[in-house]
Amino acid sequence: HRQTDKQINPHRKTNPHRKTNPHRRTNRHTPAFLLHIMSDLNPNKDRPVDGVQDDGITSISWSPKANYFVATSWNSQIRCWQADMSGQSIGRGETKQEGPVLCSAWKGDGTQVFTGGCDNKALCWDVGSGTTVLCAQHAAPIRQIAYSDHLNCLITASWDKTVKFWDARKSNPLVHSLQLSERVYCMDIKNRLMVVGVAQKDLYVYDLQNPQRELKHYTSPLKYQSRCVACFPNATGFALGSVEGRVAIQDINTPSKSFEFKCHRQGNNIFAVNSISFHPGYGTLATAGADGSFHFWDKDSRQRLKGFQKMHTSISCSSFNGDGSLYAYAASYDWSKGHAFYQSMKQNVICIHRATDSEIRDRPRPR
């Protein structure tokens, strides 16, 4: 039988007036393996988010008007949190779709969230009232979604090889449809610029002033499948990430400024670039990958600004908030290696990193 301290030392004196704090947490009695797991889940000491979905996180989107963000998941759940300036967050609501949810976007005024998924539908969720309505429909899963303030309409892109434009104010909300050569894998818009990446490495660029007509049609400069795309904050170009651990910077107006760089590689191991997010103020960018790490880059001086500690699993998605002060990222299996490598015991984690000027601000390349 286990002996108490009093049995071991019967002459030991105790203070009957000593007060203890039952809520006090120490590492003194925490097993070493648990401390290792706790550290592994948040090696960068960022703010963890409570109440994260227990299945793969597919997208993170911030409201353009306040520090509200949503995360979507393979388990059909859509959850919303509010964060303060330190990155501490609190849950503000949740809803569901009929199938796995693949993408999300906020309306420009920050009142509604749009989501699309494997039920071939897009929903509009009013976070304030909690109501959801069907706002778009495709013949196959909706892979990407965006809201254009310029057109005041919703844009959905699907594996049915179409991009559709929806205006809920009209009796017939479908106002335009683009037929593409292949399934849509990635899409982004900024002001009047829209870039769509499809299977077989085709890239379509549109001016949303005239979306019926292609502005440019590229073949990806990268050797393998496109994974993610993000438009420059000034809408003069875009960054394209692929499964080969490489990013292409494409300047639309000045092609001579375009280049590629390698990232998310460890020795001979090459990992997919799952997410690219531009800082709204400085024009620098963050990449996050299947290797579980994220990095900040300056495309203009062509240098890495800072790299961060690797998470316990791949980072599936990430995003800066409206002013670039907070960077949210999800450590969650991205299915890049298929079902055989899925480990259900690995916990999904969303963390919020405070992006300081010393980390993310553009700077001259050292001589």
Image (cartoon, grey):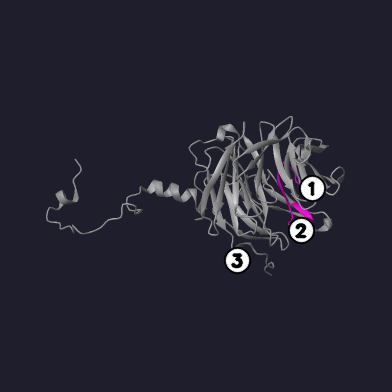
Q: Quadrant of the N terminus?
A: top left
- Tell whether 282 sits left or right of 92: right
Q: Which residue is mark 2?
A: 234
Give, as a single range, the part of the protein colored magenta: 222-238
Q: Which residue is mark 1?
A: 151
Q: Amino acid at mark 1?
A: Leu
Q: Which residue is mark 3?
A: 358
Question: Mark 2 or 1, which is nearer the eye?
Answer: 1
Residue 361 visible in the shown view:
yes
Question: Badge 3: few (under 14), some or many (20 or more) residues near its Cα, within 10 Å?
Answer: few
Q: Amino acid at mark 2?
A: Asn
The answer to whether residue 225 is magenta is yes
State the CA–CA distance, disc 2 to disc 3: 22 Å
The answer to whether residue 152 is magenta is no
Q: In the picture shown, does residue 149 fall above or below 120?
A: below
Residue positioned 61% across, 39% down in the render: 131
State the CA–CA distance, disc 1 to disc 3: 37 Å
Name the residue nearer the viewer: 206 or 131.
131
